[in-house]
Amino acid sequence: MDKALWYLLTATRGGENRARIIRALSERPRNANQLAESLDVEYKTVRHHLDMLVDHGVVEPGDNEYGKLYFLTDRFEHHRDAFEEIMEQIE
C-alpha cells in the first residue's frame, strides 16, 4: 500500500486532487457529486480519481448505485501513517 500511495500522490499529475479526496473522505463518506462540489473540481475529474483510488484499494464504493457513497478502506486506514508521512514531505 505504501508504494501505491507514493505513486498515487506524487508520481502522477493528479496527486494533489487525490490527496484532497482522501482528506474529504476522512471527514465523512461522500458521493462523487458532493466531492466535486466541495473540492471545486469537475465531476468527471473526481470520477477519474475515485476510479484510481478504488483500483489501488484506497477507497471503496458503497452498495447503493444511485448517489453511491465512497469510504476509505480498512486497508488504507492501516496505512494512514504512511499517507500522513507522504503528505508532510510533499507539502
Image (cartoon, helix red, strand yellow):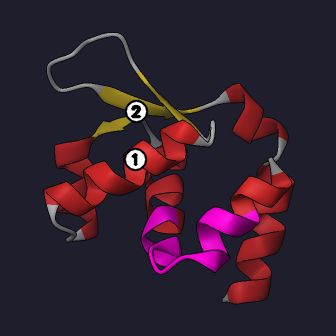
Quadrant of the rendered image containing residue 12:
bottom right
Q: Label 2, on which residue?
A: 70
At 32% from the left and 54% from the top, the residue drawn is: 48
Looking at the image, residue 40 lies above or below residue 25: below
The disc labelled 2 sits on which kind of residue?
A: Tyr
Q: Is residue 27 left or right of residue 91?
A: left
| 11 in magenta | yes
Mark carried by residue 50: 1
Q: Is residue 2 left or right of residue 48?
A: right
Q: Position of residue 28 (x, y in %)?
A: 44, 39
* Quadrant in which the C terminus is drawn: bottom right
Task: Assess whether mark 1 and mark 2 are in contact (beta carbons under 8 angstroms).
Answer: yes
State the residue in front, 65 or 30: 65
User: Is most of the magenta stretch helix, strand or loop?
Assistant: helix
Label 2 CA crowd tier, 10 Å (few <14, some 14–19, many 20+): many
- Which element is circle 1 on? helix
Looking at the image, residue 85 lies above or below residue 69: below
Label 1 CA crowd tier, 10 Å (few <14, some 14–19, many 20+): many
Looking at the image, residue 56 lies above or below residue 81: above
The magenta stretch is 6-18
